[in-house]
Amino acid sequence: MPENLNKNAITLYQRNICKKLPDAYDNEYKAILNKLQESADFIFPEYFSFHSDFKSKDKFIEDSKMTLDWLKNLSKRAEAQKTLIFGGTFLMQREKTEKPFNTLPVFYEGEILTTYQKRRLYGIETEYLSTGKVRQTVIHPHDGSKWGLLICADVFLENAFSDYKDCDFIVIPTSSPYRPDDTKELQKERDHEIYAKGSKIGGAFVLKCCGTGEIGSIKENGEKAPKLQGRSLIAHENKILIQAPDINWSGFLQIDKTNGKVSCEEYEN
């Protein structure tokens, strides 16, 4: 890659997490590499690698180590030069005697710059996971942009967005449970109330990156977690600038850091 490489896009990947992580020869991997070439920042969803084969929390923890290696190797690729990668979330267990944390790792050219632990657990997480305690920010080593970190239900913390008034961007890897009685009108109302207003409160771009499909289960009996709805979006100044066209859609949302132009591209395997 040339030293004067200019990357302007922020890319969100709304991924179907039912699928196992792709290897270097897979079409999905090639699609990700293609987007990394133009992305200053690349964002994966919460639990993006926890496919539907999982039947126990131990398997989740075991796979988290593989997910971390996969992300590290991805961030070392030439295509990822000067790209800040927000690696969705994985389960980080500091000691075998403690519950793991739902953790967002941030990579840059093969190195972890920081990790953030989810502070507001949701549903079954309250039974199996530890709760994070502190806010966390990270600065892009190349362009100097400052990012505030949240995970999914953290948006319901009292000062979730106002805590990051010193940031340019707020990233939120998310896995939203499917609601059978939901409507597009209710979804639109929630997105505006939480994320559009959050962008105004924080004075930053808000980037919510969701997964789709069915997440694996951490219950020992193999019971599956609810189906997910993908409602990825980018918000700024109390407005939704772009969002996923459908809750079952898989693909890439982008915004250009220099001119604010937004776009979306469906991923077809």
Image (spheres, rainbow, N blue to C red):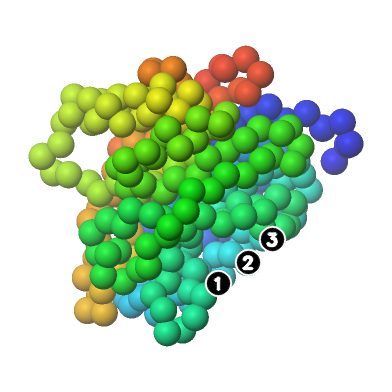
Q: Which residue is mark 1?
A: 65
- Any mark on residue 199, and which? none
The answer to the question of whether label 2 and label 1 lie on touching residues, with beta carbons closer than 8 A, is yes
Q: Which residue is mark 2?
A: 69
**Residue occupying image coordinates x 27% and y 27%:** 193
Label 1: state its secondary structure.
Answer: helix
Label 3: state its secondary structure.
Answer: helix
Q: Residue 201: image x %, image y %?
A: 40, 25
The answer to whether residue 235 is visible is no
The answer to the question of whether label 2 and label 3 lie on touching residues, with beta carbons closer than 8 A, is yes
Q: Nearer the viewer, residue 76 or 171?
A: 171
**Residue occupying image coordinates x 70% and y 50%:** 108
| Label 3, label 1: how far apart the Cα atoms are | 13 Å
Q: Residue 72: image x %, image y %?
A: 67, 60
- Any mark on residue 73, and which? 3
Q: Nearer the viewer, residue 161 or 129?
A: 161
